[in-house]
Amino acid sequence: MTVTELVSYEDALASYDPVMGLEVHVELGTKTKMFCGCSTELGAEPNSQTCPTCLGLPGSLPVVNAVGVESAVKIGLALHCEIAEWCRFARKNYFYPDMPKNFQTSQYDEPIAFNGYLDVQLEDGEVFRVEIERAHMEEDTGKSTHVGGATGRIHGASHSLLDYNRAGIPLIEIVTKPIEGAGERAPEVAKAYVAELRELIKALGVSEARMEQGQMRCDVNLSLRPNGTKEFGTRSETKNVNSLRSVERAARFEIQRHAAVLSSGGTIVQETRHFHEEDGSTTAGRIKDNAEDYRYFPEPDLVPVAPAREWVEELRKELPELPRVRRNRLREEWGVSEHDMQSILNAGAVDLIVATIDAGADAASARKWWMGELARRANEAGTDLAALEITPEQVARVCALVAEGSLNDKLARQVIEGVLAGEGDPDAVVAGRGLAVVSDEGALGTAVDEAIAANAGIADKIRSGKVAAAGALVGAVMKATRGQADAARVRELILEKLGVEG
Amino acid sequence: MPGITREEVAHLARLARLELKDEELDHFAGQLDDIIGAVARVSEVADQDVPPTSHPLPLTNVMRPDEIRPSLTPQEALSGAPAQEQQRFKVPQILGED
């Protein structure tokens, strides 16, 4: 294999203008497959979720899943698409064992949704409109395991094993129009688009869109043309890029690779490329020449889908607030910067903070705990925030205990630790660990007296008006009470006893 | 003018992974051309105002509720497989060494 010499990203952009096309496949969260009643539950044993229809056995007939069609219309509407008045399924014929029928049921020239757009917001707040070509219904393929090769890859394998549990799971494929004019920000736009689409899909409730589980997958088509020209160059298609970061890296790598090939007088081969997570590179896959021919024809076993206009309008009315609009609204309500909001989004904390506020916490506290202590713990554990064993209600309770003075931040962190360790609700952890702030004025007063006696010099400074020096005495009291005192109250007591106005 | 050329038959054979000898290509091209010619007579009676028919019945929106129905057992699913391994369908090498 020849190692690709890359040109620097800056040099590539100095000469060339990238054009992208993004194809995203979303696995719907339906209970059953697209054309039969087999379960879509993940993790079942191999070939335990198949039937004559999804195995393509003779005499079986598919019937489309009503929720699958409804989800497709919702996605189309949320992407500002037109919804077809009448459309058919089509057979995409190909010779590969991942579909036992030897064809994939898809849609060809009659997609259920077409001509839309999605506005995406880049990290600095700039909004970029990505035009949508189409969104169509299809089905996922089975899972292949290649045996006998050194690396589990298809090359060199002696044979392959097929599990058809995934074959027939509903997919929506969403295809953009050529994305032009993004220039050097093309990789960023690609990432922001996929991120926004994922948020949208989740907000619609049609899929959890977890990229790490393959519920959402992206193919990145990219070509370069000399700056100032209109005609598109030859594209490459990097398949199955399965994280937001990878989408950005794949686009960036291909820009640098294409530029290297073109600037040395070479030509880009129209081919699929494989993306490699470990170093962010791509390598050649199969050549997409004109011999690719799927012999599409209308699926005779499925009748046309003709979404009634009244139904479409009902679904339009039920659409949730679009994620970008909602984020901007929340950003203003919470009073945070674009950058902070982006961090909150990236951390997967938006809904958790909203739920915590709904449970009674103020916005600043809710944000502080989720983005601070809890983000740190999730990071340590290598999990998502949402996967932590603490609920927004429990976090709200911690916020309330801090607000009423029963806990200080240090104790609150211990309470959170207890909740995460399965010791029960915050109140149970407080009781179980004896974590309440020392508010017994007698005990506090004694501790303050002792601190003043042990630090006569500092006490004198405070008496003479250097109020800032009180911090040292507060520290001493906190140390003596092992952190279980309310620092603000300690400070008040110190100033009171020394006869100084705070 | 023939309904299908020898080259088109060769192309279709390749798509379907059928290895046809030269004389077979000649033979099938002729036969398929006859068949297509016969079917093409339908177009002679159908005028421009008759769209190609994909579905003979005037039905739309036949859908099923998203309710799980029992699947086959893995043993039943695999019962027709020529070969199996690890409860999966076993298929021959997909790509050769290249």
Image: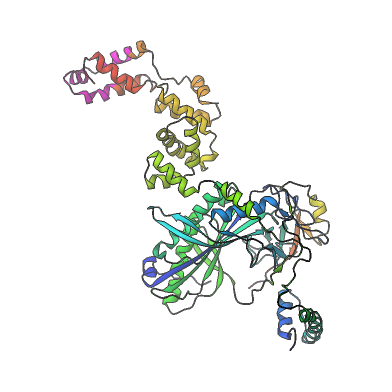
Location of residue A270 in the rendering, given as x and y in whole percent from the top left corner: 55, 74
Q: Residue furthest bottom?
A: B1
Relative placement, left or right, of A355 versus A183 is right
Please say whether residue A214 is visible from this viewpoint: no
Above or below, comparing residue A387 to residue A34 in the picture: above
> Which of the pair A134/A315 is nearer the observer?
A315
Q: Position of A116 compared to A138: left or right?
A: left
Residue A20 horizontal/vertical position (percent): 49, 66
Outermost top residue = A442
The span picked out in magenta is A445-473
Q: Is residue A37 above or below residue A375?
A: below
In terms of image quadrants, where is residue A457? top left
Residue A128 position by quadrant: bottom left
In the image, A26 versus A303, the foreground residue is: A303
Residue depicted at 57% across the width and 50% down the height = A316
- In this view of the protein, can residue A388 be seen by the observer? yes
Q: Is residue A457 magenta?
A: yes
Residue B47's quadrant in the figure?
A: bottom right
| Residue B5 rendering spot, x and y as whole percentages | 73, 85
Q: Does the magenta stretch include residue B59?
A: no
In the image, A143 versus B55, the foreground residue is B55
Give the side of residue A207 with respect to residue B36, left or right: left
